[in-house]
Image (cartoon, rainbow, N blue to C red):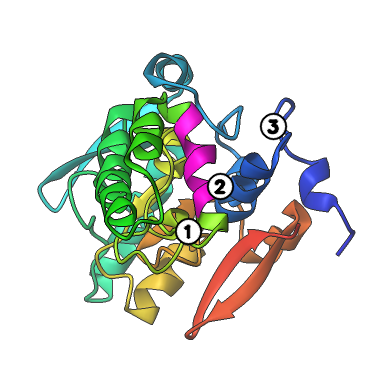
Amino acid sequence: MVAGLFLSILPKGVRATNSVERRLLAEYGAVFVAQRVQPPPKIVFKDENDLAVFQSELSVSAESFAGFDMELQSTAMADLQRAATEAKEAGLAVSPRGADSARRSYEETVALWESRVTPALKHWVGKKRLTQSEADRIESLSLYEQVPEVLRLEDKGLFFAKDLSKSIIYSVAPPGASQHHSMLAFDVKEYENPRVRQVLAKHKWFQTVVSDLPHFTYLGVDESELPNLGLKKVIESGRSFWIPDI
């Protein structure tokens, strides 16, 4: 594979200018080279308004899956429906894990983020690894400012994932960085079934976040074409993930 291919074909304006953005690009970046759809124009949306402008410009389809109303970019939804139909004909199912399996607003990711950050700050203050004043300062920041502060603490071993043993980005995406914002991600209830994963891949849906097993990303091309987008395959526990080759 040509070195630097992934970075060279990112959409105009998508550039990692600091260590936080580089880390997020490595973790969630496959979505930026998705084809036949509109990838996000930036690595992190700063707030609800910033995201709303982008979402308002997309071609979106709404469909009901297993009793849940889901919204995705129209091309992604069409291929997901084809995958669901093929799965059903084979006696399988492709269904969402819950109500937030497809489109997510900025505020929905805020709730997930805060559910990790607030108890973690309390924990590290209790362990005397962090002062109360420092915890209060971090909580008072805007979320856009808070993300690098949390990652800075994690570099010192103060982790913010739910079990406090690993990085928060292996637990939830920071607000503004989720692939679900772009309506190109779908959390699949049947993710453990290899036959379901094969059907999804046939219809251009792939696993792209190694730390999030139910998460599938619409990339818009056949698997054979993914290396040409600067993505590389990694195998974890018998599953294939396509991640940025950076």
Q: Is residue 68 visible?
A: yes
Q: Secondary structure at mark 2?
A: helix
Please identify the dominant SS of the magenta region. helix
If you read the primary sequence from the N terminus, does the residue marked by circle 1 or circle 2 appear first?
Answer: 2
Is residue 149 located in the magenta-colored stretch of the structure? yes
**Mark closer to the observer (2, 3):** 2
In the rendered image of this protein, does residue 164 appear above or below residue 143? below
If you read the primary sequence from the N terminus, does the residue marked by circle 1 or circle 3 appear first?
Answer: 3
Magenta span: 145-153
Q: Residue 152, labelled with which disc? A: 2
Residue at the location (36% across, 39% down)? Answer: 135
Residue 166 lies, in percent from the top left, at: 44, 66
Gap in angstroms between the C-alphas marked 1 and 2: 39 Å
The residue to which callout 3 is attached is 14
Query: Mark 1: which amino acid?
Result: His
Gap in angstroms between the C-alphas marked 1 and 3: 26 Å
- In this orientation, which residue lies closer to the viewer: 155 or 137? 137
**Mark closer to the observer (1, 3):** 3
Q: Residue 203, labelled with which disc? A: 1
Gap in angstroms between the C-alphas marked 2 and 3: 23 Å
